Amino acid sequence: MNINTALLTSILDKSPSHIAVVDSTGEIVYVNKSWINFGRENGKNNNQWIGLNYLNISQQSAQIGDALAAKAHLGLSQVISGECDEFTLDYPCHSDTVKRWFLMRAQAHEVHGLRLVIIYHDQHAAGSELEAIKERLMLATDVAQMGIWEWRPSDNSLIWDHWMYEIFEIQPTDTSGYLWDWINQIDTDDKARVKLSLIDASNRKIIFNTEYKIHTESGVKILQSRACTIEDKENHSIKVVGVTQDITHHRLAEQKIQILAYHDQLTQLPNRRLLNDRLNQALAAYQRNHLMGALVFIDLDNFKIINDSYGHKIGDLALTKISKTIRQYLRSKDTLARFGGDEFVLLIPELSNNTRDAKIAVEALLKRLISQLEKPIFLADISVTVTASFGITFYYAGNQDHTELLKQADEAMYQIKRKGKSSYAFYHQPPHNRKLINSTKIKLLNTVKQK
């Protein structure tokens, strides 16, 4: 026995859990001291464990009518065969003098390519201890404001505790005591999904865990419900017992974090991070539909004069007003992002499969924007006029680098800045790059002709 094996054995022997290890046939290959000691208390000695087949033991008990043994046999067989990786079972194991309850857990592990299953038997509380646990559980649900419920599929009856009525903002006298009291308050978009998930959990004996919205007098709430199915001795589902919690504030807080992380705080427009994500989506969509799109760099003309003349508060109001004006002319699939300061980037995906039509569509949009932006903006007691310069580049096959696209749009925008502003320009590829691309196209055509 090497040091690692000796250390592991020492740790397992000190565990209060009764632990056994079985191989892929169900044969017991190891038991710890807690298992041995419990066996001796019940008339077994060490030599009677190693080499025994745990599956055979449970099957023999099942054949004489022990329903829990049959369930243990089935669950352990599924873990050993690889149908699942874990199985649990709560069962009584009473002696003549003591009533005891145990939790059996079977977990699969791969060791040097062999599938071994570790079986744990842990004794848990009963009697007065269970009552104390129940009291602590009730206290915990009160602190967490968590509702407890029970649904019986046989007659559709529904039992709620007081917190469920608090969460749903209704009185016990307002309900009929059936499942539809719950389902009818669920948002239309979630109603069918929740009901089917609940029925599925009952039929397949799986965990029910879902989020959904409900409509109450105080407004819309977001709830999370979790439940498990309780079975009888014949493995028939008799009820589903679960908990429900109002997570509205939690989800709203998450949404605020998302907004802060992906949106500009002043204008509420997407920031650079979200722009990159949307650009990734647009480029991926191009690979599927081959509809080219445009990236437009927008720089406000002489915006510094407004800040210097009226202060940053008026400047911020102007930026917010301008962003709202531009958004009025965009499609739902377009993205206007604030790039920083008085710079914006406009992503216009899925324009056309040819450059001519794409160019026509972009020009029509920019002409409307230029015309609208040249009108005075009324802010507080003053009126200002803010124009903009637009630089446009198209993305297409072989031209899908984020940094390069932004550089191209920025370069086109500065062409307008140098020429007089309040207009737009398309990026034109330098002549040496065009020659290189044309040369590559000729080589490809020649290769195709030769084939």
Image (tube, grey):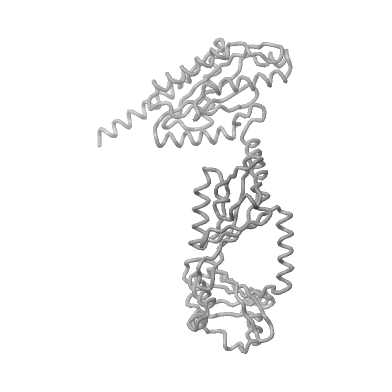
Residue 170 vs residue 445, the one in the foreground:
170
Residue 289 x/y as whole percent: 39, 34
Total of numbered circles in the picture? 0
In the rendered view, tell whether residue 34 sits above or below residue 135.
below
Taking the spot 53% from the left edge, 29% from the top edge, the residue there is 335
Residue 74 vs residue 114, the one in the foreground:
74
Q: Quadrant of the N terminus?
A: bottom right
In the rendered view, tell whether residue 325 sits above or below residue 3.
above
Residue 377 x/y as whole percent: 63, 13
In the rendered view, tell whether residue 37 sits above or below residue 170.
below
Q: Quadrant of the C terminus?
A: top left
Taking the spot 44% from the left edge, 20% from the top edge, the residue there is 361
Residue 308 x/y as whole percent: 72, 15
Q: Is residue 450 left or right of residue 254?
A: left
In the rendered view, tell whether residue 116 sits above or below residue 65.
above
Q: Is residue 339 left or right of residue 70?
A: right
Residue 403 x/y as whole percent: 54, 31
Q: Is residue 3 left or right of residue 449?
A: right
Residue situated furthest left in the rendering = 450
